Image (cartoon, helix red, strand yellow):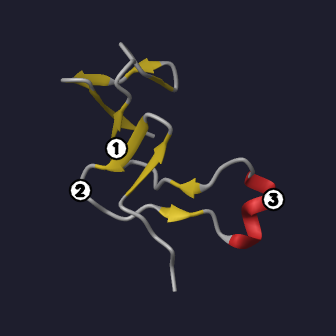
Amino acid sequence: MSDTCDGIKIGKLRLWEERGNAIEPVPQELCQALAPATHCLPEWADYWVEFPEADELLVSGRRAINSRGRFKARF
């Protein structure tokens, strides 16, 4: 059984997949190798990032689209 979640919250930062798909935790057998990562984000999906104090967000050197304090990003 998978321990999925609707989004990730770290301090004031929130991240969720645009279509509401669940975000999977790092598989137990990869936890040590991928530490400190806690979750796997599927590629080519659109995500929203909310961080109230941020003016911009860079993902792979590109500015994420800012929409009313939320940033749309694709990894």
Residue 61, placed above or below residue 39: above
- Residue at 34% in and 33% down: 50
Nearest to N terminus: mark 2 or mark 3? 2
Q: Is residue 59 left or right of residue 6?
A: right
Check disc 3 and give the amino acid type.
Answer: Gln
Q: Secondary structure at mark 2?
A: loop
Residue under label 2, please give it: 19
Residue 65, placed above or below residue 9: above
Circles 2, 1 touching at the beta carbon (< 8 Å) = no
Say which quarter of the image contains residue 62. Answer: top left
Check disc 2 and give the amino acid type.
Answer: Arg
Which numbered circle lies on residue 32?
A: 3
Which numbered circle lies on residue 47?
A: 1
Dot 2, crowdedness within 10 Å: few (<14), some or many (≥20)?
few
Q: Nearer the viewer, residue 37 or 75?
A: 37
- At which x and y percent is residue 32? 81, 59
State how far apart marks 2 and 1 are (Cα): 8 Å
Residue 26, placed above or below residue 28: above
Residue placed furthest toward the right: 32
Residue placed furthest toward the front: 11
* Placement of the C terminus among the 4 image quadrants: top left
Nearest to N terminus: mark 1 or mark 3? 3
Circles 1, 3 touching at the beta carbon (< 8 Å) = no
Say which quarter of the image contains residue 64. Answer: top left
State how far apart marks 1 and 3 are (Cα): 25 Å
Check disc 1 and give the amino acid type.
Answer: Tyr
Say which quarter of the image contains residue 30. Answer: bottom right
